[in-house]
Amino acid sequence: MVQRRPAFLDFIPRAYSPWPIGVLSLCLSFPLGVQAQEFSTSGFASLVLGRTSGACVASGLAPAHSNNCTRFIADWAHAGVYGDELTATPESRAGLQATVKFNPQWSATTQVTARAVKDQALNLEWLYLSYQIAPEWTLQMGRKRLPLYYYSDFQDVGYAYNTIRPSPDVYGWDVVNYNGASLSYSTEAGAWTLRTEVLVGSENSKKNPYARLYNEAPKDVSWGSIGGISFEFSKDWFSGRLSYVSSTVKQIDRDSGLVEVEASGPKQDFLGLAVNADFEHWIVRSEFGQAKREALNYKAKYYLLTLGYRMGAFTLTGGSSAYLENSFDEAAYSPVKLRSQLLALRYELHKGGALKLQWDRVRDSSAVPGAGNAQVLSASYDVVF
């Protein structure tokens, strides 16, 4: 007998099975005596408007993104691209998060995010169980954000940072989630607060949005055997983060079934370092990283650095970033080279709500241009509730 999928699970994309569905089933299987003791919700939304300008440049992007005179990739992971017409589609989003606490040890968390960009109407970003093994130790199982960066866990929450977006030169890979398990340890050493996390898992992305930027035909992308570790440290006004993630990578042409990148090839790995400071009126944010993706024929180094200054309800931020690839075989792959500058102004409109205005300049010096050079003017209203 074939069992029908319960109706209340229909909002969860099937591609995310079996990990998240198994986690939700486990949540529902708790005896009634230990069902939810506490229930909390929160949400966020960002309305972002933007457009590009500058001299017309050639494009190496797929036809769907090549119609405009200038282009700017604001969100690589979800194929959010601005052109020279004002639009709110590439980055506008809203999300809801809910946490159910069954008892002092067990809880469950889920987050669903809706986006205006094409084919991204509803994404399941979080769905995991947490078990408090001891005050310092936490085990989590299910679907989570892959912690490649400092902002990874709250990248969608625009209110959480002073620019409209974390620099796309750094924040942009084809996979942003994983299904698996993580174990974290938090402690204090003198005046220092320390946290270490290890994780394992995998992710299958159907009709991958990142691949759609350069390919007209849809691609399925899988990261397997994901393993990672991160170490966070903070003291007074200073904080930092060191991370390492590795995995296999596989890409399949969805229409033909042709395997374009084989999972048995070389593993890819990502190394990242963030160093931040909040001292009186000054705000420093920096990230440095490198990626080795031999199966895709390149390695890359990237960084971002921003300096902000608070003036009452206003925060002025300037910054620079770069993403520079080197090819293992330039005859087979032409490396990407991007450099960017930004200037942003944030105004705290009300508690939990901020207005932002930002100007970006991007220089694409790749031998074969992708999006090309552009200047970008964008504005946003970010809110949490």
Image (cartoon, rainbow, N blue to C red):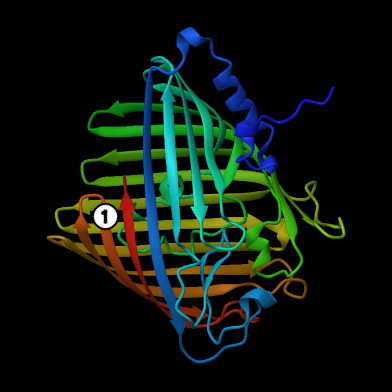
Task: From the image, tell me which residue sits under label 1.
Answer: 353
Residue extending farthest to the bottom is 55
Front residue of 384 and 284: 384
Question: Residue at 64% across / 26% down in the picture?
Answer: 22
The image shows residue 53, relative to residue 326, as above or below, that is: below
The image shows residue 354, relative to residue 177, as above or below, that is: below
Residue extending farthest to the front is 7
Q: Is residue 145 visible?
A: no
Query: Going by the image, does 163 lie left or right of 324?
Result: left
Q: Is residue 251 visible?
A: yes
Question: Residue at 66% across / 79% down in the picture?
Answer: 60
Front residue of 168 and 333: 168
Image quarter of residue 343? bottom left
Query: Going by the image, does 192 lie left or right of 313?
Result: right
Looking at the rendered structure, the kind of residue marked 1 is Gly
Query: Going by the image, does 29 lie left or right of 194?
Result: right
Q: Residue 108: where, in percent of width, then height?
A: 48, 26
Q: Residue 375: where, in percent of width, then height?
A: 43, 82
Number of labels in the image equals 1
Residue extending farthest to the top is 33
Quarter of the picture containing the C terminus is top left
Q: Residue 368: where, in percent of width, then height?
A: 65, 81
Q: Residue 323: where, in percent of width, then height?
A: 52, 68
Front residue of 232 and 316: 316
Front residue of 224 and 45: 45
Q: Secondary structure at mark 1?
A: strand
Quarter of the picture containing the N terminus is top right
Other residues around mark 1 within 10 Å, as few (<14) / some (14–19) / many (≥20): some
Question: Residue at 64% across / 68% down in the picture?
Answer: 213
